[in-house]
């Protein structure tokens, strides 16, 4: 697809991007086993949507699954191909990809889908996932709700300093627009000269109710949602895990 339409925000913050630690992915895998993996056939084909650096894909491969990952960041996929040898990876945007019914399950962990900042575009993602699933296939994914984003009502600062790179990340949630802005100011040492760049990414929180309505409008059935902190004892309150299925044809 055209690089003009593809979300490539992570390419601009490669050095500042903080991947989940391996133990966190193992926790997610345990959760997925309970929610969907135990119901899949041996060697099932799983689609890792917004796969990032391929950490989950690597764990799924070790469990004997076939794995295809998709991400909109060329840099993330470069790492993914090194980390998850044996998986297939696709450079594309979750809002626009088109795949035929191939997968027993589609999974997306983390806050990646919160970077889709309108419910209409999020519904496009759901349509694309639905089309890529085999009948009765599972879709499991995470989204942040407003409960988490309200923590950013006052500006929060994160950052790091290394010999050749430094950054400051400022988080600010606008409760009227219902958008969180992640503003990065980065300094990189290149050939003895420090270069500054400024990047702002946006995330949108979604309520479980509006997500459930969107999923059902696409055709998904058996829609369930869980608050990860309250229901699973992991993560943060306000991070919601959704599980649903593609309907069987009549």
Image (spheres, rainbow, N blue to C red):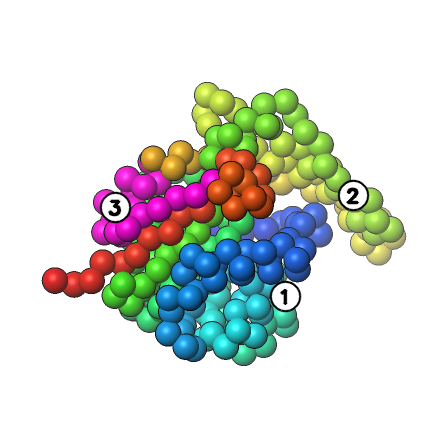
Q: CA distance from mark 3 to mark 2?
A: 42 Å
Element type at mark 3: helix
Q: Can you give x and y, in whole percent of width and height, for residue 115 in the image?
A: 49, 43
Q: Is residue 212 magenta?
A: yes
Name the disc covering residue 239, or none.
none
Which residue, given by chain and number where applicable, does mark 2 sit on?
Answer: 160
Residue at image point 40% right, 34% down? 207
| Disc with the residue nearer the chain's start (2 vs 1) | 1
**Residue 229 relative to residue 196: left or right:** left
Element type at mark 2: strand
Q: Can you give x and y, in whole percent of width and height, for residue 163 in the image?
A: 87, 51
Name the disc covering residue 216, or none.
3
Task: Say few, some or many: other residues with alpha carbon within 10 Å of mark 2 (under 14 / 14 to 19 / 20 or more).
Answer: few
Task: Say few, some or many: other residues with alpha carbon within 10 Å of mark 1 (under 14 / 14 to 19 / 20 or more).
Answer: some
Element type at mark 1: helix
Q: Can you give x and y, in whole percent of width and height, for residue 182 in the image?
A: 60, 36
Q: CA distance from mark 2 to mark 1?
A: 21 Å
Span shown in magenta: 210-227
Q: Can you give x and y, in whole percent of width and height, for residue 66 in the image?
A: 46, 75
| Disc with the residue nearer the chain's start (3 vs 2) | 2
Name the disc covering residue 79, or none.
1
Q: Residue 200: tell me if it is visible.
A: yes
Quadrant of res 154: top right
Residue at image point 46% right, 59% down? 34
Residue at image point 52% right, 69% down? 60
Nearer the viewer's eye, disc 3 or disc 2?
3
Q: Is residue 4 magenta?
A: no
Q: CA distance from mark 1 to mark 3?
A: 35 Å
**What is the total number of numbered labels drawn onto the structure image?**
3
In this view of the protein, which residue sits in the foreground, 155 or 136? 136
Q: Quadrant of the C terminus?
A: bottom left
Q: Looking at the image, is 74 positioned above or below residue 243?
A: below
């Amino acid at each position: 697809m055209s690089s003009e339409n593809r979300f490539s925000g992570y390419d601009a913050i490669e050095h500042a991007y903080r991947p989940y630690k391996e133990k966190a992915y193992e926790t997610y895998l345990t959760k997925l086993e309970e929610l969907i993996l135990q119901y899949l056939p041996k060697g099932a084909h799983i689609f890792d949507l917004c796969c990032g650096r391929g950490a989950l894909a690597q764990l799924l491969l070790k469990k004997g699954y076939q794995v295809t990952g998709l991400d909109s960041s060329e840099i993330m996929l470069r790492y993914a191909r090194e980390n998850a040898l044996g998986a297939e990876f696709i450079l594309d945007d979750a809002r626009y990809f088109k795949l035929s019914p191939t997968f027993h399950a589609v999974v997306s962990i983390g806050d990646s889908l919160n970077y889709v900042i309108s419910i209409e575009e999020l519904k496009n993602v759901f349509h694309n996932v639905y089309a890529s699933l085999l009948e009765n296939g599972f879709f499991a994914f995470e989204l942040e709700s407003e409960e988490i984003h309200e923590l950013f009502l006052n500006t929060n600062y994160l950052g790091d300093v290394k010999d050749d790179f430094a950054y400051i990340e400022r988080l600010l949630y606008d409760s009227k627009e219902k958008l969180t802005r992640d503003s990065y100011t980065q300094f990189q040492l290149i050939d003895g000269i420090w270069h500054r760049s400024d990047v702002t990414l946006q995330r949108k929180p979604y309520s479980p109710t509006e997500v459930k309505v969107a999923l059902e409008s696409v055709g998904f059935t058996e829609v369930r949602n869980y608050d990860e902190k309250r229901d699973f004892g992991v993560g943060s309150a306000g991070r919601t895990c959704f599980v649903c299925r593609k309907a069987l044809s009549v």
